[in-house]
Amino acid sequence: MRIVIVEDEIRTREGIAKLIDKLFSEHEVIGSALNGEEGLELILRKDPDLIITDVRMPIMDGLTMLSILFEKKVKSKAIVLSAYAEFSYAQQAMRWGVSEYLIKPLVVSDFAQAIKNIEMQIAESKLQSPDILGRLDHILFGLIFSGIEADEKLSMYLENKYGMNEHTQFSEVPIYLGEDYAEVIDNMKYGLKKFLEARKDLKYCLLEIPKERMLLIILYGYEDQHAEDQHATERWFQNGIISQTWGKGLQNGSYGWINAVGIKVLKASYQKLRQYMDWNISFGNAVMISYPKILQVQTTLCIYPIDIENRLKAALCSLKMDKVLRCIEKFNEYFENGKIYAPKEIKESYVRFLWAMMNVAKEIGELSQDQVDQKKILERIMSSMNKKELNAVAEETFLCIKKEDKEDPLSLNVKRAENMIHEYFQTGITLEEIAAKLNITPEYLGMQFRKEKGVTFSTYMKDFRITKAKKLLIGSKLKVFEVAEKVGYSDAKYFSRVFRENTGQLPAEYRKTNK
């Protein structure tokens, strides 16, 4: 592959180039640019196979550049790099040829997989011969999902064999099956075939899309070739299918509908509707998301429930996990009040809420970096199609925090010393006092403590006090001097200095940052 990198950060730009050279020596970086404007000129001149671009850049951002390339029918594949805050916008760029999106800072394994995915897509796009594609479902799948173009040869083949041309009226009906995909796909196809075959005047094709956990129906053969005929068919489908399938236990699915004219617009129409399929988060499941009707929906401004977040933080700092779980349940219920919110706003609220929960859990030592993959959580939130999937992300994140205690590898003396610190840290208990209670020398206890805990007694005591102080600063309204006294510091100024040395912030600054 011939690759162009568009990235304003020189370290990132050079790092990506080196990574490609190291992992994929068969590919070549043919150029790089500092912003979208330079990148646009370079790409139009060099015509690369792959574009790797950042979202936020000076002069022209990456998404604007990709939208212009899309309008100019540039066929290059694209990988978008984005920060967490830009993720939802990067997702929208799927309609501009973006095949992969990665969160900064880059994870090498994710980057390597993205390149491999692009390689597969390019290989699939080369299979454009109708003779190779064979059946209609293979051809339509290739046109919509694998980058195949409806060139003159393929267009002639479709018109001669199936009567499809640039004037043919199509209806695309995606059915999202979610986590039930593998379990229900066969029964869904069987039921749909029986239902659709009852309409002798209408032709159809069913496409399985396991990657998106979707079943796509392509309807065509409208005799009147009028929009009203398609609207009547939409009502017939909605009344005849949705009520039946929901009555048979499909709990996590959702339906969409969009009309298109001509085989060349099937891909663009599907991608346009795909952006709105998550409106089931706002409406509930048994509703058909019909484009362009969905554009007329009036929404209510989503006010983030900061009071629930504050209660969650207080419960977490008190380690009252039953109350933490109730806060999560209250947060889930907050969006089920009969009001219609834009799904993007609901998703952004979930990101804010779960990030607050994870950040506090990390601050108080209840969650480590390797216990949770924030990138995957973000991807799951932004790709969710219904409320149940959002609820599941929240509950699973909670379970990462509410972990089972592992078997304690500490010796009895060190364990007893640790317990005494936890019980008497407010009094400033010393190593000598604990050693005396255990009938061993302070030197021996100090050596064993450092060997088993990995830190000295004094460092452990200080860190434990600072952790307790963090919990009180986030989860209570105590004044700073009261927090100092609670964790064993009689001098509030000295406490503030120790706290800043440990965290980089004064207690008041820390509280403001995490409230």
Image (cartoon, helix red, strand yellow):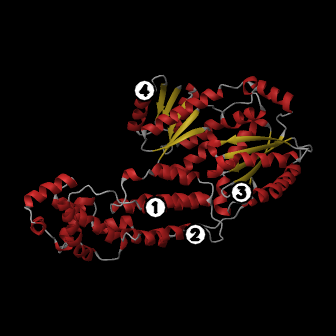
Q: Residues within 10 Å of mark 2 (few under 14, many from 20)?
A: few
Q: Marks 3 and 2: CB-CB under 8 Å? A: no
Dot 2 falls on a residue whose secondary structure is helix
Q: CA distance from mark 4 to mark 3?
A: 46 Å
In depth, the one of 31 and 451 nearer the eye is 451
Circle 3 SS class: helix
Label 1 amino acid? Phe
Is residue 59 something that shows in the picture?
A: no
Q: Earlier in the sequence, mark 4 or mark 3?
A: 4
**Location of residue 515 by image quarter:** bottom left
Residue in view at x 18 percent, y 64 percent: 417
Point out the frontmost of discs 3 and 2. Answer: 2
Q: Is residue 511 visible?
A: yes
Q: Which residue is mark 1?
A: 398
Left or right: 317 as drawn, with respect to 377 = left
* Disc 3/disc 2 C-alpha distance (Å): 26 Å
Q: Secondary structure at mark 4?
A: helix
x, y percentage for residue 267? 71, 39
Relative image position of residue 482 (x, y in whole percent): 26, 77
Tell me the amino acid under the disc marked 3.
Leu
Q: Residue at x 70, y 33 (%)?
A: 142
What whole-number distance in Å separates the C-alpha atoms at marks 1 and 4? 40 Å
Q: Looking at the image, tell me whether mark 2 or mark 1 is earlier in sequence order.
A: 2
- Marks 3 and 2, the one that precedes in the sequence: 3
Q: Please state which amino acid type lies under the numbered disc 4.
A: Asp
Query: Can you tell which mark lies on residue 333?
Result: 2
Distance from Cα at disc 4 to Cα at disc 2: 50 Å
